[in-house]
Image (cartoon, rainbow, N blue to C red):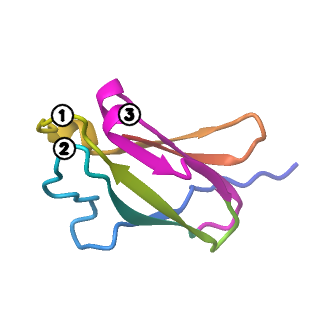
Amino acid sequence: MEAEAFDINVNLNFGNETNIVDFGNIRVLEEVSKPVTIKNTGPYEIKYIFNMKTKATRQLFKISPDQGVLNPNQEAQITVTAMAEKEEQIPRKHVESNTRFRRNSVKLPVYDIKL
């Protein structure tokens, strides 16, 4: 029996040097979208999933597509859209991502991004 251990190698490109999606100031009910590129730099197919941890974050941001499958060296364009229904300031802790890895039922490595 042979086995191979590997890391999930994914690059997220936010189109800027700060590596964050920066919407700046947005007017109430104004919808603003920003592109993010995700690339599988590893040797195996992966599935990615973007999840919003808090209800407040889910109400302010939409990600499309929020999941997908990438073959080795394949990339996909993701659109992050922000819109507020009322004036508010968003604490940085709500929008900084932490990442974790898990496997799903179809046995693909999954890059699960929590926002």
Q: Secondary structure at mark 2?
A: loop
Query: With 73 as the anchor, is 13 left or right in this view?
Result: left
Instruction: Please give the name of the residue rendered at 61% of the width and 46% of the height, measured from the top-left corner.
Output: 110
Q: Position of residue 15 (x, y in %)?
A: 33, 73
Q: Is residue 61 left or right of residue 107?
A: left
Q: Residue at x 25, y 44 (%)?
A: 29
Residue 55, quarter of picture: top left
Q: Residue furthest front?
A: 29
- Residue with the mark numbered 3: 58
Q: Would you name the residue on which mark 2 appears?
A: 28
Which amino acid does the dot numbered 2 rest on? Answer: Val
Name the residue nearer the viewer: 44 or 2: 44
Mark 1 residue type: Lys
The C terminus sits in image quarter: top left
Q: Is residue 6 visible?
A: yes
Mark 3 crowdedness (10 Å alpha carbons): few <14, some 14-19, many ≥20? some
Label 3 vs 2, first from the N-terminus = 2
Could you say which is closer to the camera, residue 97 or residue 91? 91
Q: Which residue is mark 1?
A: 86
Residue 59 x %, y %: 35, 33
Q: Secondary structure at mark 3?
A: helix
Q: Nearer the viewer, mark 3 or mark 2?
A: 2
